[in-house]
Amino acid sequence: QVQLVESGGGLVQPGGSLRLSCAASGFIFSDYGMNWYRQAPGKERELVATISVFGSTRTYADSVKGRFTISRINSKNTMFLHMNSLKPEDTAVYYCNANMGSRGVYWGQGTQVTVSS
């Protein structure tokens, strides 16, 4: 079955960096675009970044443009989110997402990112 497992979250000071990872299994990773979402307390889940099958197309929410970078290594079935210049408003649970159309939409369990001094 499809599994998405995030890791790499934690507590970081403002201005710091983190790298999130998403390990995928149960499907042909290189067949699908992938996404990162986040959900802050009391807010709706929002799309943070997307990456196409071979990484040639990447999109970002305005709030993270220039600070976050999405990437993937298809041979390792893994996607990353490199987060720099972190701000307190980046505090959220970050989720890996695969939208496979008729096959369904899949989510990881999430990883907590807390930006605080």
Image (cartoon, rainbow, N blue to C red):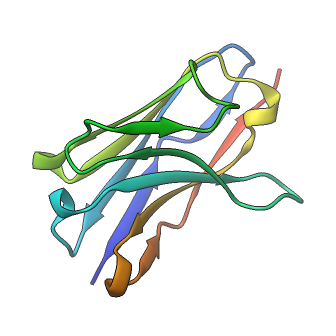
Q: How far across and down, in percent of the image, does residue 21 sit?
A: 39, 44
Q: Residue furthest left?
A: 75
Q: Is residue 116 above or below residue 35?
A: above
Along the horizontal axis of the image, is 111 left or right of 23? right
The percent coordinates of residue 83 (x first, y second) are 54, 27
User: Total number of numbered labels?
Assistant: 0
**Farthest right residue?**
42
Q: Is residue 71 left or right of residue 74?
A: right
- The answer to whether 44 appears left or right of 2 in the picture is right
Spot occupied by residue 53 in the image (x, y as percentages of width and height) = 23, 51
Image quarter in which the C terminus is found: top right
- Residue at 58% from the left image edge and 20% from the top image edge: 67
Q: Is residue 72 above or below residue 31?
A: above
Quadrant placement of the N terminus: bottom left
Q: Which residue occupies 47% across, 38% down?
A: 59
Q: Looking at the picture, how far across and down is residue 18, in whole percent?
A: 53, 28
Give me the residue at 10% from left, 47% from top.
Answer: 75
Q: Quarter-wise, where is residue 81 in the image?
A: top left
Q: Is residue 24 above or below residue 104?
A: above
Q: Is residue 35 above or below residue 11?
A: below
Of the pair 6 and 43, the residue shown nearer to us? 43
